Amino acid sequence: MIDKNVHPLIEIRNLVAKYGETTVLQDISVDIHPNEITVILGGSGCGKTTLLKNILRLYEPFSGSVKYWGEEVTAMDEKDFNDKVLKRIGMLFQGGALLNSLPIRENVSIPLEQHTILPQDIMDRIIRTKLHLVNLDHALNLLPSELSGGMKKRAALARAIVLDPDILFCDEPSAGLDPLTALSLDELILNLKAQLNMTIIVVTHELSSIHRIADKIIFLDGGKMLFTGTLEAAKASGIKAIDTFFNAEIKSK
Ligand SMILES: Nc1ncnc2c1ncn2[C@@H]1O[C@H](COP(=O)(O)OP(=O)(O)OP(=O)(O)O)[C@@H](O)[C@H]1O
Ligand SMILES: [Mg+2]
């Protein structure tokens, strides 16, 4: 199932993730290819967020290998990982994770302050550009509590892309949004891929989003990877859990 034709940007081999004694992901091997949108699918609690957090080393994998740009990162010290990988990555957390006490301007500024030594006026210009990109020019000085759910997601997206990352991770970007807002967020994600050449990894349950944005999917079930490949190939795979997932989504519409 591993595509050998294009050099992958992220290579995950035999990844095992645990919380304490509990194994949550077993033996995951998958490639993420450049300038593609990879969608991670699977039922609630199957380990999607855990997979993202292990790839990002927010949790250390129990065992296995994770390579970015061909370089193994599981043994890298924190500073190396920060300099070589984290600086080039943006993350939109499930729920947005904006800091409620800070205005949007300061929320979006956090990665710039952590990873750069740019002068304030340049930072301000970058922040305004990113807020413009997500259609939130007017939100610069508002607090997160003054934004709607969809606006919060877009503000969190502005923060995730403020360093012009090569790779963007999005955990359930359109969950809880109305269909039109979800559509505009998908269009933003497609633009980031097309215009800024980003490689994007998205966790979502939304069937319409999956159809709009996915170049490849990774299907997880009970901590195992059942399938990776195109959506069409997934649907033609005859794998029962995948059929059930898509049928359940259709029935719930
Ligand atoms: N910090 C943690 N400590 C212990 N167990 C955890 C922790 N985070 C998640 N889990 C458990 O690991 C399993 C996978 O959780 P995870 O959040 O990765 O699922 P998910 O696929 O992202 O679900 P959802 O679609 O609901 O977001 C669940 O059984 C969950 O209870
Ligand atoms: Mg999750």
Image: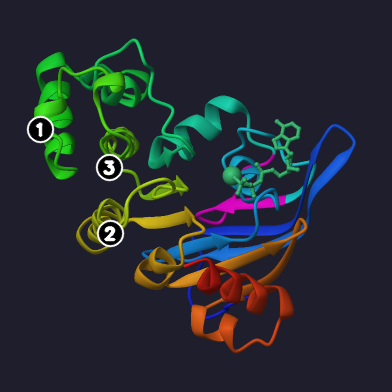
Q: Local crowd at mark 1 within 10 Å, few (<14), some, or many (≥20)?
A: some
Identify the image quadrant of residue 154. Answer: top left
Left or right, 212 with respect to 131, comes to right
Identify the image quadrant of residue 245. Answer: bottom right
Residue 133 in percent (x, y) is at 15, 44
Q: Main secondary structure of the magenta part?
A: strand
Q: Which mark is residue 164?
A: 3
Left or right, 148 with respect to 121, comes to right
Circle 2 sits in a helix, a strand or a loop, which is it? Answer: helix
Question: Mark 2 = which residue?
Answer: 183
Q: Nearer the viewer, residue 192 or 197?
A: 192
Outermost residue, top side = 101
Residue 210 in percent (x, y) is at 44, 67
Task: Say above or below: 224 vs 174.
Answer: below
- Seen at 49% across and 30% down, the residue is 82
Residue 227 in percent (x, y) is at 66, 73
Question: Mark 1 = which residue?
Answer: 137
Start-end of magenta stretch: 65-74
Q: Is residue 237 magenta?
A: no
Task: Say above or below: 149 vs 26.
Answer: above
Residue 142 in percent (x, y) is at 19, 19
Instruction: First in sequence, mark 1 or 3: give its number.
Output: 1
- Seen at 44% across and 27% down, the residue is 97
